[in-house]
Amino acid sequence: MSKPLTPRLKAILQALLVTFLWSTSWVLIKIGLAGIPALTFAGLRYGLAFMCLLPFALQLGSRRAIAGLSRRQWARLVLLGVLYYAVTQGTQFLGLVYLPALTASLILNFTTIVVALMGILFLSERPAALQWTGIAVSTLGILVYFYPVSLPRTELVGVIIVGASMFANAGSAVLGRNINRNENISPLLVTVISMGTGAVILLASGLLFQEIPRLTLVDWAIVAWLAITNTAFAFTLWNHTQRTLSAVESSIINSTMLIQIAILAWLFLGEGVSLKQGIGMALAALGVVIVQLRRTPPQELRRTGKETIRQLD
């Protein structure tokens, strides 16, 4: 008779499932972009995910919490929605029009490093020696991956767009951490309000600046899967795992996404990886893990784990 899974092992397996779902998002987005304009695509995904999460946010206790939000809190949540969903996700979808999925994910993987550096300025968090080592290793990995720099013009445009997405993602992570520290708002409300704000902006931008698409059944299936399974369900499951896993464990599990995306992109998109790119990718992922391996009090670990929800796809 087999032994039942321990709560920790169960949480690890659930977190790995979430990272797999998030990794498949990159492949599905690349496929969907063939028929759906980028901004409209992003708006549909997060708009539908918002509708899925809204009933939970409108429960009695949550309605009271929403009514009790101050103007300042509303302003900060709206700003988070603009920064994380409208800007970060919008530019991420746009960048995938020009870049292979693996290249885009590698650039965005550098977000953790930028967050550590921005923490010096905005959160008075000074990286320890181990974190500086991780920053150096991850930077070396990026340089190895792209050396020698000889990108076609279209890919260069993509690098610039995804680079902007990475900085916006880092800024939203710092803002989200600040909100989590200083505002007594549940992670669900933070997500629903910011996601709804960003989705409206993305959809409006898509209608204004891009063609109105005629979606096929396959297109709608991709949008629905991304919204319901890879966003609403994955968010809920990831949030559940944070009750058991530390922030370091969650970060290490999340770092496996780079490898998962590489395998999925090779299988379904035909994106190959050279030995040099593989080494660079491994160094970049290792550097991100090292940055997270700092000594952190248990209370901080639990808080940071909740913040991770809003930083991941």
Image (cartoon, rainbow, N blue to C red):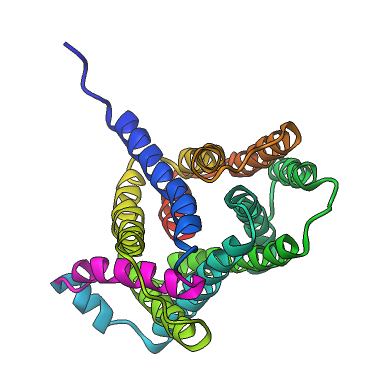
Position of 143 compared to 11: left or right? right
Magenta segment: 36-59
Residue beneath the point at 33% across and 71% down: 192
- Work out whether 54 lies above or below 155: below
Looking at the rendering, in which quadrant would you find the N terminus? top left
Would you say the magenta stretch is mainly helix, strand or loop? helix
- Work out whether 46 lies above or below 293: below
Q: Position of residue 89 (x, y in %)?
A: 51, 67
Residue beneath the point at 50% across and 38% down: 267
- Residue 78: within the magenta? no
Q: Position of residue 105 (x, y in %)?
A: 59, 51
Asked if one can make out residue 298 in the rendered structure from this viewpoint, the answer is yes
Q: Position of residue 294 (x, y in %)?
A: 60, 41
Between residues 164 and 3, which one lies in front from this camera angle? 164
Asked if one can make out residue 304 in the rendered structure from this viewpoint, the answer is no
Looking at the rendering, in which quadrant would you find the C terminus? bottom left
